[in-house]
Image (spheres, rainbow, N blue to C red):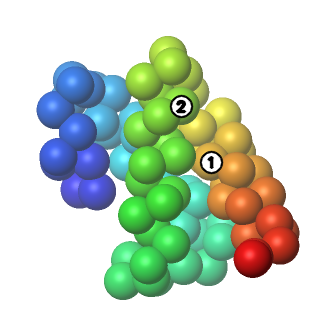
């Protein structure tokens, strides 16, 4: 469970977040050992912390955030 260290969430919310995480992994074709998974989990946690509870929206918004970050030019 990628959110075991996020103690501010109850078990039901952690399960929703995990569903979003699993969907995002699949959508992005990431393996659990990919370094981007930490950023993905953090993005989902931030959205959930803001009150989002729909797994589809959590997934969609987290994927969009990661894609936007990947497109930013590096300095």
- Report x, y in % for residue 13: 33, 27
Residue 38 is tagged as none
Local crowd size for mark 1, using a 10 Å CA cut-off: few (<14), some (14–19), many (≥20): many
- Report x, y in % for residue 11: 20, 29
Q: Quadrant of the N terminus?
A: bottom left
Q: Which residue is mark 2?
A: 47
Decide which of 73, 25 is in the foreground and name it: 73
Question: Pointer 1 and pointer 2: residues touching (CB < 8 Å)?
Answer: yes
Query: Is residue 54 shown left or right of residue 70?
Result: left
Decide which of 39, 4 is in the foreground and name it: 39
Question: Which comes sooner in the sequence, label 1 or label 2?
Answer: 2
How many discs mark residues in the rendered view?
Answer: 2
* Residue 5 shows in the view: yes
Q: Residue at x 66, y 34 (%)?
A: 57
Query: Is residue 28 shown left or right of residue 11?
Result: right
Query: Is residue 72 shown left or right of residue 60?
Result: right
Q: Residue at x 50, y 72 (%)?
A: 36
- Report x, y in % for residue 47: 53, 31
Q: Residue at x 58, y 70 (%)?
A: 26
- Report x, y in % for residue 64: 75, 51
* Residue 19 shows in the view: no
Residue 52 vs 17, above or below: the answer is above
Give the CA distance from mark 1 to mark 2.
8 Å
Element at label 1? helix
Residue 50 vs 37, above or below: the answer is above
Residue 39 vs 73, above or below: the answer is above
Element at label 2? helix
Q: Quadrant of the C terminus?
A: bottom right
Q: Which residue is mark 1?
A: 62
Query: Is residue 71 shown left or right of residue 35?
Result: right
Local crowd size for mark 2, using a 10 Å CA cut-off: few (<14), some (14–19), many (≥20): some
Q: Residue at x 44, y 78 (%)?
A: 35
């Amino acid at each position: 469970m990628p959110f075991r260290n996020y103690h501010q969430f109850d078990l039901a919310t952690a399960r929703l977040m995990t569903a979003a995480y699993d969907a995002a992994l699949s959508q992005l074709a990431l393996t659990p050992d990919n370094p981007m998974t930490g950023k993905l989990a953090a993005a989902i946690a931030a959205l959930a912390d803001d009150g989002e509870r729909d797994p589809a929206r959590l997934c969609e918004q987290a994927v969009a955030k990661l894609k936007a970050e990947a497109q930013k030019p590096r300095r």
